Image (cartoon, rainbow, N blue to C red):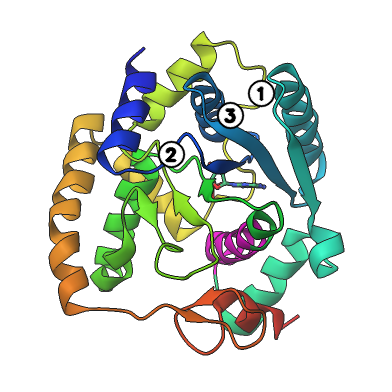
Amino acid sequence: MIIEKKVAETIAKYKLLKKTDKVVVALSGGKDSTSVLYILKKLGYDVEGLMIDLYLGQWSETHKENMLRICSEMSVPLTIVDLKEELGQGICFIKAVLKKQKNLTGCTVCGIIKRWILNKWAKKLGADKIVTGHNLDDEAQNVLMNFLKGNVLLGVNSSPATGGKEVKGFAQRVKPLFFCAENDIRAYAKKMKFDILYDKCPCSFETYRADTRDWLDNISDGEKLAIVENFQKLVPGLRRENVREMKVCGKCGEPASSELCNACKIFACL
Ligand code: AMP
């Protein structure tokens, strides 16, 4: 199948994973992360699932039930991290506070929190790599959003393999679906009859990302691929001229680009 072949090719070309790696797959419960878990297991990688219960009502409950069932069917261990146990609050409260205090939009806050928890728990689980289900459409949105915000340099780390590598002791985050279009992944997941929710996140509306996504719906998957591939050609040059030293957060010890990581800056507001 085309998606499976593309994933294997991306892993080989960018040296994303080794068969000896302990691979933790970040599971949202959606089609992308479910598909990547299934494909990696099929390709013979040593995978396990890691899911954060964000407390988004019935949406989260259904995703949890689905992942518990699917991981059990695939004989894959699954860890579910409870956001309220981690941070004392569900994601909606955290986002509301940050919107008010820092005017940060929902997807930005949710992304920072998820990344922080995934890093922390991947380390606890002894992971060599964290896999996420980010796909071609996500990457095309990133390129465009960074460009429109006048901050192209935010994409300096854009790659199927991001972060972690430079910082000893941290699992590197990798994206085997980097070049796979969302439409193709949805078709694959439906063909495989994954019994999951196919809707978009209930919170991702009226955000900059959602607007960009809607706008990109007007162009073909080939054009999205061109956006991502052409930006990839610029990345090495951007990196050479903008070497960013990876640091360790002075408060929590997780990776950071300044003295405090973005998550600790958020926690200070709660
Ligand atoms: P999103 O930010 O919702 O577009 O999700 C991008 C990727 O982040 C997903 O494909 C998953 O790999 C990961 N992810 C999103 N939500 C969760 C979650 N609640 N728990 C664990 N991983 C997640």
Which residue position is annotated with label 2?
A: 18
Q: Where does residue 234 sit, x and y in percent of width and height?
A: 14, 60
Instruction: First in sequence, mark 2 or 3: give its number.
Output: 2
Tell me where residue 246 sits by quadrant. bottom left
Q: Is residue 7 left or right of residue 205?
A: left
> What's drawn in magenta, residue-wise?
105-119
Q: Where does residue 258 sit, x and y in percent of width and height?
A: 47, 86
**What secondary structure is marked by label 1?**
loop
Tell me where residue 7 sits by quadrant. top left
Q: Are marks 1 and 3 in contact (CB under 8 Å)?
A: yes
- Residue 109 belongs to the span the image colors magenta: yes
Q: Where does residue 235 sit, x and y in percent of width and height?
A: 19, 61
Q: What is the distance, in whole Å, between disc 2 and disc 1 at their CAs? A: 29 Å
Q: What is the distance, in whole Å, between disc 1 and disc 3 at their CAs? A: 9 Å
Residue at the image position 32 percent from the left and 43 percent from the top: 15
Circle 1: residue type: Ile
Q: What is the distance, in whole Å, between disc 2 and disc 3 at their CAs? A: 20 Å
Residue at the image position 31 percent from the left and 53 percent from the top: 159
Kindly identify which numbered label has been placed on residue 34. Answer: 3
Task: Indicate the quadrant containing the N terminus: top left, top right, bottom left or bottom right.
Answer: top left
Circle 3: residue type: Thr
Depth check, mark 1 against mark 3: the one in front is: 3
Q: Where does residue 190 sit, x and y in percent of width and height?
A: 53, 14
Task: Indicate the quadrant containing the C terminus: top left, top right, bottom left or bottom right.
Answer: bottom right
User: Magenta stretch mostly in which secondary structure?
Assistant: helix
Circle 2: residue type: Lys
Circle 3 residues within 10 Å: few <14, some 14–19, many ≥20? many
Which residue position is annotated with label 1?
A: 196
Instruction: First in sequence, mark 1 or 3: give its number.
Output: 3
- Residue 111 belongs to the span the image colors magenta: yes
**What secondary structure is marked by label 2?**
loop
**What secondary structure is marked by label 3?**
helix
